[in-house]
Image: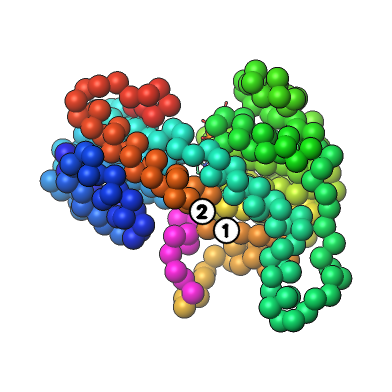
Amino acid sequence: MKIAFFSTQPYDITFFESANQAFGHELVFFTQALEPTTAGLAAGAQAVCLFVNDQASEASIAALAKLGVSTIALRCAGFNNIDVEAAKKAGIKVCRVGAYSPEAVAEHAVALLLTLTRKTHKAYNRVREQNFALTGLLGFNLHGKKVGVIGTGNIGQAFCKIMLGFGCEVTAFDLIANKEMEALGVVYAPLIDVLASDIISLHCPLNEQTKHIINAETLGYCKKGVTIINTGRGGLLDTKAVIDTLKNGTIGALGLDVYEQEEKLFFKDLSSTIIQDDIIQRLMSFSNVLITGHQGFFTKEAMEKIAHTTLENISNLEKNLPLATSNSIV
Ligand code: NAI
């Protein structure tokens, strides 16, 4: 099958060309993100392969359908950027990589957390300048702290296990309590109780129920000095409310791998441009905020799995074979 890749980065080409040796699809790579005006690049392809910031809106889907595209294959887990109803109506199948390496994202959440709690980002710069003073680097132990996890799917579970290993007390909020997690010692509780933790980590999908789940009201239930980690999706936080809460000192530290308006910024080198987004500039100005550019998924193991599963999904759909439930959207 001919597959048109949108939002391609050099590493996508490396991993997908290598994985494709086992599948033999025809791959064409475009750096542009999918939007109605770029959909035409998929002419001649039967499938498109999309990433987190491609916009498969109703208009993009209509343009793809006109070209005869029958499959949208996401090379990621989240699918909040896809108009699922429009795809259904257009008769386009949509698949994703439901679980590639939940540990990759969970470990990145922990990397953000440990960097913030032990200030290693500051220590790194200080020591390079031969400043070995410790003033200002006082951290706190994770051991014994109350960690609140919102969303205990694949990534949330991997995160819970790591936190339990650190000796934390883990409470969680999810629509469904996970028995395996409960057996390990995770206690499920209502959202307001989970918010009253020392550390909060977000691992639920972005949808109508979870948009701005962290907002001015819910931040009111948080402890003063709370550390919040978001590796889920930027829209889980009401960024404006978060900035106000950083300014009044309620949020002690914030680690973000995702950002509400990230599609204009992330995965691009903007080092010689003037960034027009004042909100991210304000976030970056806080000394207790650490931002990474959506790299939670970015490990060798995860990239190999993503490439293999995406191409396998497309091959199975081509042969009318069923997909794993977690990979099938439409
Ligand atoms: P998953 O589908 O395995 O788990 C999601 C969990 O959230 C489920 O247990 C579900 O019941 C729960 N949930 C759904 N709605 C909820 C609600 N209203 N309140 C509380 N919990 C709710 O998904 P997975 O693989 O664990 O990924 C979670 C999210 O992480 C993805 O949707 C994606 O947005 C994000 N992600 C981020 C990556 C990164 O590189 N930073 C990479 C991969 C995923």
One can see residue 172 in this view: yes
Dominant SS of magenta comes to: loop
From what the image shows, is residue 306 above or below residue 169? below
Which quarter of the rendering shows the N terminus? Answer: top left
**Could you say whether the residue bearing mark 1 is in a helix, strand or loop?**
loop
Q: Amino acid at mark 1?
A: Thr
Residue that label 1 marks: 292
Residue that label 2 marks: 295
> Cβ(mark 2) to ligand 1 < 8 Å?
yes
Which quadrant of the frame does ligand 1 lie within? top right
Name the residue located 68 percent from the left edge and 78 percent from the top edge: 128
Rendering coords of residue 252 (x, y %): 79, 54
Rendering coords of residue 210 (x, y %): 59, 35
The stretch in magenta equals 261-271
Q: Nearer the viewer, residue 25 or 269?
A: 25
Name the residue located 79 percent from the left edge and 37 percent from the top edge: 167
Q: Residue at the bottom extreme?
A: 129
One can see residue 3 in this view: no
Which quarter of the rendering shows the C terminus? Answer: top left
Q: Nearer the viewer, residue 82 or 289?
A: 289
Mark 1 near mark 2, Cβ–Cβ under 8 Å? yes
Q: Nearer the viewer, residue 63 or 103?
A: 103
